[in-house]
Structure formats: C-alpha cells, structure tokens
Image (cartoon, rainbow, N blue to C red):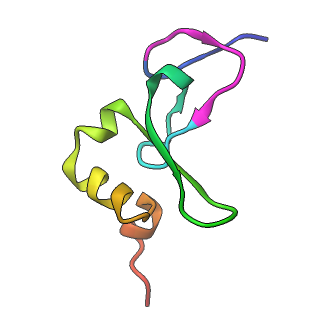
Amino acid sequence: MAMLCERCRTEVYKYVVCNYCGRKICNDCIKSSQRASKTTRLVICKDCWSDMKKRKAYKTKVSLAEIKAPAQ
C-alpha cells in the first residue's frame, strides 16, 4: 500500500510526523530533527521552519503540544 507525503504529495514507503503541524512527511520534506531526550525525537518540516514561533519552540526542544497546553 502506497502512502503519500502530505506536503509534497510524493509516494513514500515510510513517513515521519512533524511535531509542529502534525502532517505525515517524507525524508525530503524534513528540515531538521533532533533528540529532545533519550526517547523523544523532534522533527520539523520545511513549512514549519519558516514560522518563527514554531522554529523557536524547536530550538528550545519543546513540542507544539507543550506550547498549547501550558504546565500548571
């Protein structure tokens, strides 16, 4: 079963989910990825990289879910 990248619409075998927009993207659409901890990997796509709020969150190793729901 073939899947499509939600950003560039190319056919992919394996996809990665962007932590900032939630789209399933191929390896060509990944702008950057990093390990936030031993078990957590943060991935940002090329579209989210141009949004400064999302880029700052990525560089401080915070996922967008943590931004939307502040800690109490």
- Using the rendered view, name the quadrant where residue 63 is placed: bottom left
Q: Nearer the viewer, residue 57 or 68?
A: 57
Instruction: Give the vertical position of 71 relative to 10 (above or below).
Output: below
Q: x, y percentage for residue 69?
A: 42, 73
Instruction: Give the vertical position of 7 relative to 10 (above or below).
Output: below
Q: x, y percentage for residue 72?
A: 43, 90
Please give the name of the residue rendered at 55% of the width and 24% of the height, measured from the top-left corner: 27
Q: Is residue 19 left or right of residue 40?
A: left
Secondary structure character of the magenta stretch overall: loop
Q: Is residue 18 left or right of residue 41?
A: left
Instruction: Give the vertical position of 71 relative to 68 (above or below).
Output: below
Please give the name of the residue rendered at 32% of the width and 40% of the height, measured from the top-left corner: 48
- Using the rendered view, name the quadrant where residue 45 is placed: top left
- Using the rendered view, name the quadrant where residue 15 is placed: top right
Please give the name of the residue rendered at 79% of the width and 11% of the height, measured from the top-left corner: 1
Q: x, y percentage for residue 67?
A: 37, 68
Q: Nearer the viewer, residue 50 or 2?
A: 50
Instruction: Give the vertical position of 34 relative to 28 (above or below).
Output: below
Q: Quick one: which residue is furthest to the bottom in this view?
A: 72
Q: Is residue 30 left or right of residue 4?
A: left
Q: x, y percentage for residue 59?
A: 34, 58
Please give the name of the residue rendered at 72% of the width and 17% of the height, measured from the top-left corner: 13
Q: In the rendered structure, does residue 50 fall within the stretch colored magenta?
A: no
Q: Is residue 62 left or right of residue 14?
A: left
Residue range in magenta is 8-16
